[in-house]
């Protein structure tokens, strides 16, 4: 009996998660966790430097992180599906995004699958969010950010929101990632929204103090 081909309408939309070698690898790891229960299919691309940074900053193994994604792509596989604009996705989040990866995307130099996938998202006018992690920023960084912003890329540095009065680093990370997922109309339930009750377990309403 011939296999029944799954139609596009039967599949959840795809979202690409890129993890580059900047400090802040926990953002990419936690992003995959938050996406797990949501109606999306996650496609992960990690650079080799990201794997090194992961070992420095967390207790996660690379294999542990890859298990969190629905599909994993090798960073040097430039023939992967993500390299083609005919492969539909919602877009891409690079969390964190190193200035090297940002610079490659800004100049169209696609040396690996992460930057190639971002280039495809850009040319297909899909949503591209770069959680650029670097400070202080010099003129070249700022120039590349401006160029990307003019092309419609969203530059979203992982800046903590202290108005939410986070009680832990985990809360700070989750709030930031929740705001990034807002950009894709995905509700992770982790954002302490202004004037509303805090997410379950936090017990504070986010309102200004007089």
Image (cartoon, rainbow, N blue to C red):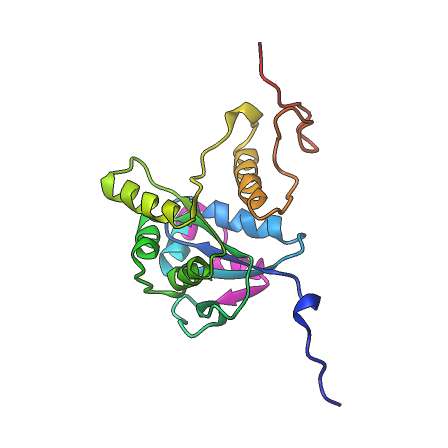
Asked whether 171 or 135 is in front, the reply is 135
Direction from residue 149 to residue 187 in the image, left or right = right
Say whether residue 165 is visible. Answer: no
- Which residues are the magenta region? 54-73
- Residue reaching furthest to the right: 1
Q: Is residue 57 magenta?
A: yes
Task: Kindly identify the residue that appears in the image at 63 percent across and 54 percent down.
Answer: 36
Q: Vertically, is 15 above or below 3?
A: above
Instruction: State the image coordinates of residue 165 (x, y, percent, origin top left).
Output: 56, 24
Direction from residue 123 to residue 109 in the image, left or right = left
Task: Kindly identify the residue that appears in the image at 43 percent across and 57 percent down.
Answer: 122
Q: Vertically, is 153 above or below 196?
A: below
- Residue reaching furthest to the left: 139
Q: Quadrant of the C terminus?
A: top right
Instruction: State the image coordinates of residue 147 (x, y, percent, origin top left).
Output: 32, 47
Quarter location, residue 67: bottom right
Instruction: State the image coordinates of residue 174 (x, y, percent, origin top left).
Output: 56, 39
Task: Kindly identify the residue that appears in the image at 55 percent across and 39 percent down.
Answer: 179
Task: Kindly identify the residue that appears in the image at 57 percent across and 48 percent down.
Answer: 184
Say whether residue 81 is visible. Answer: yes
Q: Vertically, is 53 above or below 87?
A: above
Quarter location, residue 149: top left
Q: Quadrant of the N terminus?
A: bottom right
């Amino acid at each position: 009996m011939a296999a029944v081909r799954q139609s596009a309408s039967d599949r959840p939309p795809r979202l690409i998660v890129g993890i580059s070698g900047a400090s802040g690898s926990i953002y990419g790891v936690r992003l995959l966790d938050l996406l797990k229960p949501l109606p999306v299919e996650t496609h992960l691309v990690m650079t080799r430097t990201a794997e090194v940074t992961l070992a420095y900053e967390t207790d996660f193994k690379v294999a542990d992180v890859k298990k969190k994604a629905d599909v994993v792509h090798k960073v040097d596989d430039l023939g992967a599906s993500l390299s083609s604009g005919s492969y539909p996705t919602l877009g891409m989040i690079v969390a964190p995004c190193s200035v090297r990866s940002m610079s490659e995307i800004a100049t169209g130099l696609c040396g690996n699958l992460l930057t190639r996938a971002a280039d495809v998202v850009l040319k297909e006018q899909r949503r591209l969010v770069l959680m650029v992690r670097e400070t202080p920023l010099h003129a070249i960084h700022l120039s590349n950010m401006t160029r990307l912003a003019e092309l419609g890329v969203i530059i979203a540095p992982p800046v903590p929101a202290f108005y939410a009065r986070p009680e832990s680093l985990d809360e700070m990370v989750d709030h930031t990632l929740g705001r990034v997922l807002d950009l894709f109309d995905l509700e992770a339930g982790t954002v302490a929204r202004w004037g509303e009750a805090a997410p379950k377990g936090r017990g504070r309403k986010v309102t200004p103090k007089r």
